[in-house]
Image: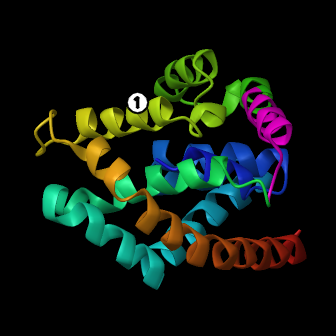
Amino acid sequence: MNYLAHSFLSFTDGQIVGQFLEDFIRNKDRFSFPKDIQDGITLHRAIDTFTDSHPAIHEAKKVFSPLVRLYAGAFVDVSMDYFLATDFTLNSLRGWKEHSLKVYRVLNENKEWLPENFKKMLVKMEADDWLYNYREDWGIKFSIKNVLNKAQYLDKDLPVFELFLQNKEVLQKCYNHFFPDLLNHAKGINALLQLEN
C-alpha cells in the first residue's frame, strides 16, 4: 500500500515499474520481465522484509493493532507515506510533485508490462494524484478507506483515520526512526543489484 515509499526508493525507471508490479503478479511470473523490472520486484521485497522487522514499525503497529489486529501493518504503511510526502529533508514540495508526475509517466510508458487490474488502478491514481496528495489529511483518509474496503474481515466504518489523527505525533517519531534506515538499506540493495548487471 505504501506506493510513495516504493516509488521513491527506486533508482531506475525499470525499478519503478517492478516496485509497483510486485503486488500484482505471481511469484513464478517475475522472471518474464526485463532485468531492470525484476530488480524493482527484488527491491520491493527487500523493502517489505526490512520494514516488517524494524523496531519503529513494531511500535507504530501498536497504534492500530487494538482496532484492526493483523491489518495494522497495512495502515502503518499508509501512514508512513503521509510522513514521507511531508518530509522536506528528502524533497521539496515541487520535488515531490515532479516525482509523482515522473512515476505516472514511467508507468504509462511501460503499460505493456502492466496487468489489466493495475492499469485500471493507475487511471485513478493519476487522476487523483495519489502520490502527491498523500501529504493531505484527506488524501491519507482516502487511502485508509481503500484499505478498509479491501480488508475482508474488518468493519468498513472503523475509525482508523481518527486513530491516525490522534496518534500523528507518535507515528511521526516512528517514521523519523525508521525511514533513514530504510533509505540506507534500499541503497545497499540497489548497489548489489547493479553489480549483477
**Is residue 32 visible from the viewing direction of this image?**
no
Question: In this view of the protein, which residue sits in the foreground, 93 or 194?
Answer: 93
- Is 171 within the magenta? no
Determine whether, in the image, residue 22 is placed left or right of residue 97.
Answer: left
**Is residue 131 visible from the viewing direction of this image?**
yes
The residue located at (66%, 65%) in the rendering is: 43
Determine whether, in the image, residue 1 is placed left or right of residue 161.
Answer: right
- Mark 1 secondary-structure assignment: helix
Magenta region, residue range: 90-104
The residue located at (40%, 59%) in the rendering is: 76
The residue located at (57%, 75%) in the rendering is: 178
| Disc 1 residue crowd, few under 14, some 14–19, many 20+, Cα 10 Å | some
> Residue 197's image quarter?
bottom right
What residue is pinned by disc 1?
A: 142
Total count of labels: 1
The vertical placement of 117 against 12, above or below, is: above
The vertical placement of 41 against 142, above or below, is: below
